[in-house]
Amino acid sequence: MGRVSPRHPRAESLRVRAQLVEGFKAGLVVPEGLTAHGRGEAFDYILGEQTSEHARRAIEAAVAMLLLAKHPVISVNGNTAALVPAEIVELAKVANAKIEVNLFHGSVKREASIAKWLRRHGAKEVLGTELKFSTRIKEVHSDRRKIDRRGIAAADVVLVPLEDGDRTEALKKLGKRVIAIDLNPMSRTAQKADVTIVDNIVRALPLMVKRAKRLSHGSKTKLREIIISFDNEANLKATFRLMLNRLKS
Ligand code: ATP
Ligand code: MG
């Protein structure tokens, strides 16, 4: 991509696009990932391309849930790996979570490329690439149902940045608590998750790392209080209102 002036009103958004295109060229991202990002951008535009107070509240609850989990797992797809690899690795470290590559458009080669890319950013262990540990979610058809026995299959809490609705529903049916990051508050993923962070992953992940570092020193009682006082449905409604008000004015 050509050079973009930092004064360009879409400078940050264009930088993120370029990063995704690099990920595409490197074999991390599929063409469908590029279009999914475009859908996200449209919602981000309405949100004013900034993290709302509602998203901040969801981030706090999400981090508390990850820190309290017995077996937290962060599910990583191509777009997530391309956009926030270092932050994923850092969050996993602070929250003591496992990282699992889990692709909507699965391919052994792309799984391996993503795992290698995450290791290059400091990940010690990346699950989801070895056939011998692979098991299936019965509720999901086609090749999208593959999960790792040591990872998502055994998890109590799963963070799914940019997940598809079918798989989110399947994870819920398996009894997992699901944390979603999704710019579309109307998607099935956003509606079905236990904690929905309506924000761009490029902003949400660094904030999650910061929050996790701070909250990891707090008591479990405090973490439980944060989760109990968080109401995802009310938070999503407040996000809708914010978007509506922005559209009206
Ligand atoms: P669902 O299957 O949950 O109903 P969908 O079919 O509309 O949603 P998918 O293509 O399955 O969408 O998933 C992509 C989702 O990720 C979209 O809702 C999109 O808004 C969101 N998204 C894309 N890029 C980002 C990003 N950078 N940050 C946060 N969310 C994003
Ligand atoms: Mg979908």
Image (spheres, helix red, strand yellow):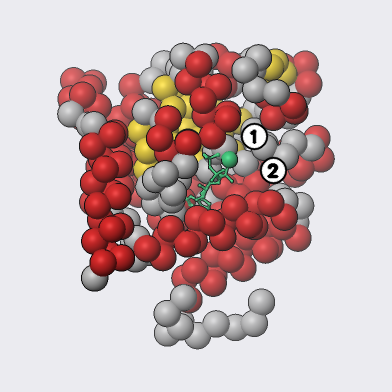
Is 33 situated above or below 163?
below
- Residue type, numbered disc 1: Val
Which of the labelled discs sits on residue 21, or is there none? Answer: none
Q: Which of the two residues, 125 or 107, is positioned nearer the viewer here?
A: 107
Q: What secondary structure is found at the residue carrying circle 2?
A: helix
Q: Is residue 82 visible?
A: no
Q: Is residue 54 left or right of residue 130?
A: left
Q: Residue at x 41, y 65 (%)?
A: 45
Query: Circle 1 is placed at which residue position?
Result: 101
Q: Quadrant of residue 146?
A: top right
The quadrant of the rendered image in which ligand 2 is seen is top right
Query: Circle 2 is placed at which residue position?
Result: 114
Mark 2 nearby-residue class (10 Å; few <14, some 14–19, many ≥20) = many
Q: Is residue 186 left or right of residue 147?
A: left
Is 17 situated above or below 242?
below
Q: Is residue 166 visible?
A: yes
Mark 1 nearby-residue class (10 Å; few <14, some 14–19, many ≥20) = many
Is 79 situated above or below 236?
below
Do the CB atoms of the residues marked 1 and 2 lie less than 8 Å apart? yes
Q: Quadrant of the N terminus?
A: bottom right
Q: Is residue 153 left or right of residue 90?
A: right
